[in-house]
C-alpha cells in the first residue's frame, strides 16, 4: 500500500511517500524548484516520491493532505468578520487566495495524480504534526506536544500517543499562539517571519533577559501549560503586513532596522562586515538592547515550553515526549526541556515544521485511519534525492575543475580527512539529501573546528553570516560526552538531527573555538555510526589526524539559496564560492 503525504500553500511545501507504513522518500519542494521556502503545489517533490517508489500517480492508494482547508478557511472568515473593519485587507486577500487555489486542492491532487477523490484525505494540521513525531519515534507510548504559529484553529496541543493512535486532548486556539508571539519579536528584531526565528534564538546569548517582565505582559501562562496572549500588543489577527501593535512599540521601543548588521561589544565588529563605522559604540549599544529583548523572548518561550512539556507528560503519565510544529525547531528550548521538564526521552523528527506535516498526514492515515501496525523508526534524515556516480562524473567532466576520482570509498575518506585536517574548506555531497532544514552530512560544507579562524574563513569565502549564527559541530555520538555536556547523545534522537543545543565542556571550549557560541553552547550533531556510516567514518578519520573527532558543519548553499541537490548545483556553488575542494561520492574536485 502506497500513501502519499502532501503539504503546500502555507510555508514549506513538501511530499513524502510510505510503502506499507515504511518511509521511502520525503523532500521539500524548494530543493527541486530552487525557490527558498517554496510553498506552491509541490509537483516536483511529488514526482520525486513517485519515482523513488517506482510507481505512477494512479498506483497511490491514498493521498493525505496536511490540514483541513475548509476548517482553516472558516477560521479566517470568522476572524475577519469579528475584526471588521480593521481586517478588511486580510479578508480581501484571503478570499482571493483561497478561492483561487487552496479550496480546490482536492481537484488539483486528483488531476495531478489520477487518484479518485474519495482516496484523498484531509488530516487536521496538529494531528499531522503529532503523527509526524510519534509514528516516526521508537516509542509505543509517549506524551505529545505540538506548537506552531497556527493550523486550522489550534496553535498548540498536548496529548498521548499509544501504539497506532495519537489522541490530542488539550488545544490552544488562535489567536493565542506561542509561534506567532515569537514571530512578532522576529519581525520586531528586523528578520523575516518564518525565516528569521532561529536568528532571534542565536542573538539571545548576546543579551541579558532584562525585559522578561515586559514580555510577560504579552503572554499569560498557567501552571497547566495553557496560555493566552494580551491581544492589544498584536496586529497579526487583523493585518497581513504587521504582526505587532503600537502598544508593543511603546513597550519595547522602535523596531530594529530590517536585516541591519548585528554586532555588540561581546561579538566585536567582524572583519567580513567591512569598514568599522564611526558610530560603532552607539550602534553596538543599540544592538545590545535588541539582544536583551531577544534574550527575554527566548527565555519566556523556553519557560513556557518547559511548563507545557511537563504538563503533557503528567497528563499522559509518561516521561517520553514527542514534539513537533515549527516551535519544536527551537533547539535551545529542546535542550532545556530534556534537562528541566522531567523528560527522559525526547523525539523530534528533522522536518518538525510544516513540511514535516506531509509525512505526518501520511502516517496518520496509515496507522490511525487504516489501523495498520507500526514498523518504522526514523533513524536518519537522508530521504531526499541521490545522484549516480555517472551523473556526478558527467557534471564534473564539463566543470573545468581538476577531478580526482578515488579508487574506492576508503581512499576518498582518507583524502577528505586530510583536506579538512590541513585547514581546507570542503563541499561534501553524499547520497540522498536531507529531510528538513538542517544539513546533516549529506549536503554539507565541512571544516576543522579547532581553528578559530575557520568562522571568519567560511564567512568571508562562502557564506557571510552574522555572529549570531554559530556554526555547528558534528561529533561522533560515542565521543560526544568528551566535548559536550549532553543529555545522552546516542540515545536522544534530536541530537542526531541537530535539534539540541548543549553546553560545551569547559576543557573543550579552547579545543573547538569555531563551533562554540558566545554562551559556551553548541548546536551539535551527534553522528551515529549505524545511521550515517560514511559521515561517521569521515569524522573518525579526521579525529585520527587531529586528535579531535569533530568537524564544523554548515549547510551546502550560498546565502539566500536553498541547500544544493544535484551535482550541477554543488559544482555551481563550489565555483561561486571560496570552497577549496568538492567531494561528491568518491570524486574530488580541486580548484587548482
Ligand atoms: Fe504547523
Image (cartoon, helix red, strand yellow):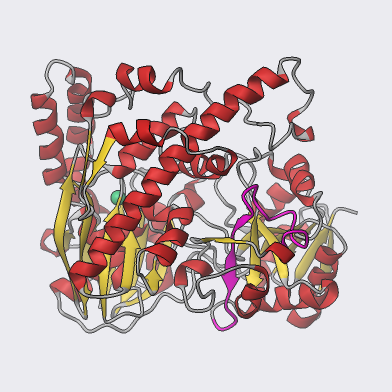
The answer to whether residue 176 is magenta is no
The part of the chain drawn in magenta is 508-530
Percent from the top left, x then y, of residue 122? 17, 57
Percent of width and height locating residue 41: 33, 47
Quadrant assignment, res 343: bottom left
Q: Is residue 349 visible?
A: no
Say if the magenta span includes residue 516.
yes
Residue 253 image-quadrant placement: top left
Task: Provide the major secondary structure of the magenta segment.
Answer: loop
Query: Toward which corner of the image does residue 582 lie, by quadrant?
Result: bottom right
- Number of labelled discs? 0
Outermost right residue:
592
The answer to whether 335 appears left or right of 480 in the picture is left
**In x, y percent, where is residue 339?**
44, 65
* Residue under the image location 66 percent in, 31 percent down: 263
Residue displayed at 53% across by 57% down = 438
Q: Quadrant of the C terminus?
A: bottom right
Give the left or right position of residue 157, taking residue 470 as reference. Answer: left
Amino acid at each position: 500500500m502506497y500513501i502519499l503525504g502532501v503539504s503546500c500553500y502555507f510555508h514549506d511545501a513538501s511530499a513524502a511517500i510510505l510503502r506499507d507504513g515504511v518511509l521511502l522518500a520525503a523532500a521539500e519542494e524548494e530543493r527541486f524548484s530552487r525557490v527558498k521556502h517554496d510553498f506552491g503545489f509541490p509537483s516536483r517533490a511529488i514526482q520525486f516520491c513517485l519515482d523513488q517508489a517506482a510507481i505512477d500517480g494512479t498506483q497511490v492508494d491514498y493521498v493525505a493532505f496536511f490540514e483541513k482547508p475548509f476548517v482553516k478557511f472558516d477560521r479566517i472568515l470568522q476572524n475577519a468578520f469579528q475584526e471588521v473593519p480593521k481586517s478588511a485587507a486580510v479578508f480581501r486577500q484571503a478570499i482571493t487566495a483561497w478561492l483561487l487555489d487552496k479550496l480546490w486542492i482536492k481537484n488539483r491532487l486528483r488531476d495531478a495524480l489520477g487518484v479518485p477523490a474519495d482516496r484523498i484525505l484531509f488530516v487536521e494540521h496538529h494531528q499531522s504534526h503529532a503523527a509526524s513525531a510519534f509514528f516516526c519515534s521508537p516509542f509505543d507510548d509517549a506524551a505529545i506536544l505540538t506548537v506552531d504559529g497556527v493550523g486550522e484553529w489550534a496553535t498548540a496541543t498536548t496529548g498521548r500517543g499509544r501504539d497506532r493512535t495519537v489522541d490530542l486532548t488539550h488545544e490552544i486556539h488562535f489567536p493565542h499562539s506561542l509561534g506567532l508571539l515569537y514571530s512578532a519579536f522576529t519581525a520586531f528584531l528586523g528578520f523575516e517571519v518564518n525565516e528569521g526565528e532561529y536568528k532571534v534564538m542565536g542573538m539571545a546569548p548576546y543579551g541579558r533577559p532584562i525585559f522578561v517582565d515586559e514580555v510577560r505582559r504579552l503572554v499569560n501562562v498557567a501552571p497547566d501549560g495553557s496560555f493566552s496572549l494580551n491581544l492589544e500588543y498584536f496586529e497579526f489577527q487583523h493585518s497581513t503586513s504587521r504582526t505587532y501593535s503600537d502598544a508593543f512599540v511603546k513597550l519595547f521601543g522602535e523596531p530594529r532596522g530590517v536585516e541591519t548588521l548585528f554586532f555588540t561589544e561581546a561579538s566585536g565588529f567582524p572583519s567580513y562586515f567591512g569598514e568599522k563605522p564611526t558610530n560603532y559604540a552607539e550602534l553596538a549599544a543599540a544592538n545590545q538592547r535588541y539582544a536583551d529583548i531577544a534574550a527575554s523572548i527566548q527565555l519566556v518561550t523556553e519557560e513556557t515550553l518547559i511548563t507545557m512539556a511537563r504538563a503533557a507528560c503528567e497528563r499522559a503519565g509518561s516521561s517520553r515526549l514527542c514534539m513537533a510544529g515549527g516551535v519544536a525547531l527551537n533547539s535551545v528550548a529542546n535542550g532545556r526541556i530534556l534537562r528541566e521538564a522531567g523528560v527522559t526521552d525526547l523525539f523530534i523528527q528533522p522536518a518538525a515544521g510544516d513540511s514535516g506535516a506531509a509525512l505526518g498526514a501520511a502516517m496518520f492515515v496509515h496507522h490511525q485511519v487504516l489501523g495498520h501496525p507500526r514498523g518504522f523508526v526514523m533513524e536518519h534524515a537522508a530521504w531526499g534525492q541521490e545522484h549516480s556516480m555517472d551523473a556526478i562524473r558527467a557534471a564534473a567532466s564539463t566543470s573545468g575543475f581538476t577531478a580526482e576520482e578515488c579508487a574506492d570509498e576508503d581512499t576518498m575518506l582518507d583524502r577528505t580527512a586530510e583536506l579538512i585536517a590541513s585547514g581546507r574548506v570542503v563541499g561534501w555531497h553524499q547520497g540522498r539529501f536531507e529531510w528538513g532544514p538542517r544539513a546533516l552530512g549529506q549536503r554539507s560544507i565541512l571544516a576543522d573546528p579547532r581553528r578559530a579562524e575557520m568562522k571568519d574563513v567560511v564567512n568571508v569565502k562562502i557564506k557571510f553570516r552574522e555572529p549570531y549564527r554559530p556554526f555547528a559541530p558534528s561529533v561522533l555520538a560515542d565521543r560526544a560526552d568528551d566535548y559536550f555536556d549532553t543529555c545522552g547523545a546516542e540515545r536522544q534522537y534530536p541530537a542526531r538531527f541537530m535539534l539540541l543545543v548543549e553546553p560545551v565542556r569547559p576543557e573543550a571550549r579552547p579545543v573547538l573555538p569555531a563551533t562554540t557560541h558566545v554562551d559556551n553552547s553548541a548546536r551539535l550533531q551527534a553522528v551515529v555510526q549505524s545511521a550515517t556510516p560514511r559521515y561517521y567514518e569521515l569524522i573518525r578519520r579526521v579525529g585520527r589526524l587531529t586528535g579531535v573527532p569533530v568537524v564544523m558543519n554548515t549547510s551546502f548553499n550560498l546565502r539566500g539559496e536553498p541547500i544544493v541537490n544535484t551535482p550541477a548545483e554543488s559544482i555551481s556553488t563550489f565555483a561561486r564560492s571560496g570552497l577549496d575542494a568538492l567531494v561528491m561520492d568518491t570524486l574530488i574536485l580541486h580548484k587548482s
